[in-house]
Image: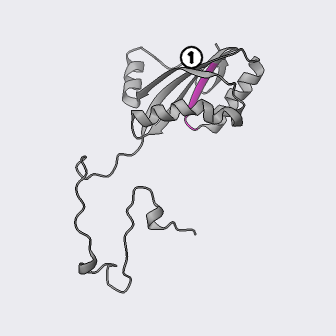
Amino acid sequence: MVRRREEALPGRRPERRLTSIEGGRGAEEQEPEQEQEPDGGQEPEQGRLWHVVLSVAGAATPLPELRTALEKLAHDHSFFLTARYAADHAEVRYWEEARDLHDAAAIALRLWGEHRVSAKLPAWEIVGLEVVDRPTYHKRVAEGFAGPPPRLGGVYPY
């Protein structure tokens, strides 16, 4: 079993441990109380789910090649929902886990470029982006607006 060093764990501050003292630390070695964070000293918020709709467009691409590339993207990206495409544009819908809207949008804006080579995506530009949190997405669906696409889980032509 491989064990990561404590200082290598994300979000953890490394601590010195004295193994010769019961409990691992002596009273003289204890560090002063840490200042409370602005969020009340609570643990950092875990990632939340964000619904992302990424629209891309560019020069016409043969449909079979485009479909294969989008299927590869769907396979490589977790939380992928669906993609719709035409020869010169596409829309990709998926869930992204991120700490906040800024992080989710930044990840979404990098998605196409980062997978362009591995999935053989066309050199298209991002022409639209929508990112909403999970409660907002579900509220929209419940109200009959911005519902899920007709077919979930796959790659389909418009």
Residue 80 is a magenta residue: yes
From the viewer's perspective, is 75 left or right of 142? right
Residue 93 location (% of width, % of height):
54, 25
Most foreground residue, 91 or 127: 127
User: For the point 73% across and 18% down, which residue is it?
Assistant: 61
Above or below residue 47? Residue 43 is: below
Quadrant in the picture for the N terminus = bottom right
User: For the point 50% across and 20% down, which residue is it?
Assistant: 148
- Specify the quadrant of the image occupied by residue 64: top right
Q: Mark 1 is on which residue type?
A: Pro
Q: How many marks can you see?
A: 1
- Specify the quadrant of the image occupied by residue 150: top right
Badge 1: how crowded within 10 Å, few (<14), some, or many (20+)? few
Residue 146 location (% of width, % of height):
45, 16
From the viewer's perspective, is 133 left or right of 121? left
User: For the point 53% across and 30% down, which residue is it?
Assistant: 109
Quadrant in the picture for the C terminus = top right
User: For the point 69% across and 15% down, which residue is it?
Assistant: 59
Judging by the rendered image, the residue that carries numbered circle 1 is: 150
Q: What's the image's color scheme?
A: one colour
Above or below residue 59? Residue 41 is: below
Magenta: main secondary structure: strand
Most distant residue in the bottom direction = 20
Most foreground residue, 134 or 58: 58
Residue 89 location (% of width, % of height):
63, 16
Magenta-highlighted residues: 78-84
Most foreground residue, 39 or 47: 39
Residue 114 is a magenta residue: no
Q: Secondary structure at mark 1?
A: loop
